[in-house]
Amino acid sequence: MSFPYPSNMPILLAPMAGYTDIVFRALCVSFGCDLTYTEMVSAKGLSFGNAKTADYLTLGDNETSVAVQLFGHEPDLLADVAKKVCDKLGERLCCIDLNMGCPAQKIVSNGDGSALMRTPALAGAIVEAVKKASAVPVTVKFRKGWDGDTCVSFAKVLEEHGADAITLHPRTRVQQYEGTADRSAIAAVKAAVSIPVIGNGDITSGQSAKEMLERTHCDGLMVGRGALGRPWIFREIKASLRGEPYAPPTVEERLRIALEHAERIEVQKGAHGLVELRKHLPRYLVGMRNAASLRVRLNEAKSVSEIRQLLLDSAKDATI
């Protein structure tokens, strides 16, 4: 059985548009994430030489193994772009992942993302074309279905056309991110195919990761929103799977990790990083005393330096 991941039970960071940039990925790697995924990358954008799209392929110094997620619906175009990505990233590229699960209207309206679950023959043709062009394994991330449960039949099509592994987020496109992830769907897909199946959805702690494995018998775990503001979740999951005790970061430690995030963004993006920080930093404050007032002050900050001072002062207060 081909396994395109860096370990036999990989804990992966999901590709999340607007969040899994070079800075956040590097933080997650530092806490034990086995494999990071780029934000989803437009194959058409890369083919047109769009500079902003190409920036998504910039990797962090500690990203020795990364997956690039491409989206699109044209087999030949995706195959050509996959080959170029392989040439560009070389040995640091673990696999090409095909996005067949994004539910965003601007994506599905073009026939991309989860819209491909409505055209399984085209999805299979895409996998086959990319597989022939790629120097690395080809994987697919998809959903339970468009508005019903079609994931088993869809998974079989992907396997038949050469997919090396698949990741299932067990919500439909219609559900978006509402409701509870249906882990029985992952179990059904795992029982139906012989390629590795990665479970994704509602993994927010070490305990929920164990429950995912016990319920689905999947071959690996992919963490998405559960890692936002909590990059240490990878360390927590690994401790839980080994049956080892785990002590979560203290409030002071959480604030200092948030500070590290801010400083990494400043180095990487300069003053432009302020917008990025406003998305990430409030998530570090969940459950903290006086979180609401600190969140307001962070959002009102006019510079990364001001954010740095707010976090330093809050970290000091947390030790008093």
Image (cartoon, rainbow, N blue to C red):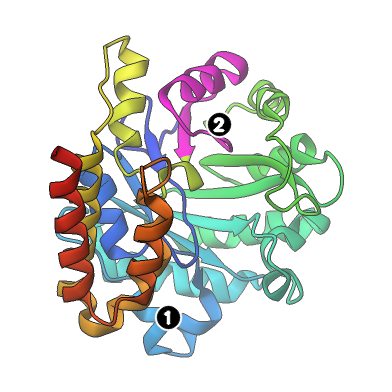
* Res 286 seen here: yes
Quick one: 120 or 104, which is closer to the camera? 104
Assign the C terminus to one quadrant of the image.
Answer: top left
Please report the bounds of the magenta region as a residue range.
199-222
Determine which of the numbered discs, if any, sits on residue 53 in the image.
1
Above or below, 217 against 186 in this view is above
> Is residue 307 shown left or right of residue 312?
right
Residue for point 64% across, 61% down? 126
Marks 2 and 1 sit apart, C-alpha to C-alpha, by 31 Å
Q: Earlier in the sequence, mark 2 or mark 1?
A: 1
The 10 Å Cα crowd at callout 2, few under 14, some 14 to 19, many 20 or more, is: many
Q: Which residue is mark 2?
A: 195
Residue 79: x and y in percent read 52, 68
> Is residue 267 shown left or right of residue 307?
left
**Is residue 216 shown in magenta?**
yes
Above or below, 149 against 264 in this view is above
| Residue type beneath disc 1 | Thr
**Is residue 231 shown in magenta?**
no
Residue for point 27% across, 19% down? 246
* Res 224 seen here: no
Above or below, 28 against 133 in this view is above
Residue for point 31% across, 57% down? 24
Residue 111: x and y in percent read 74, 71
Residue 254: x and y in percent read 25, 43
The 10 Å Cα crowd at callout 1, few under 14, some 14 to 19, many 20 or more, is: some
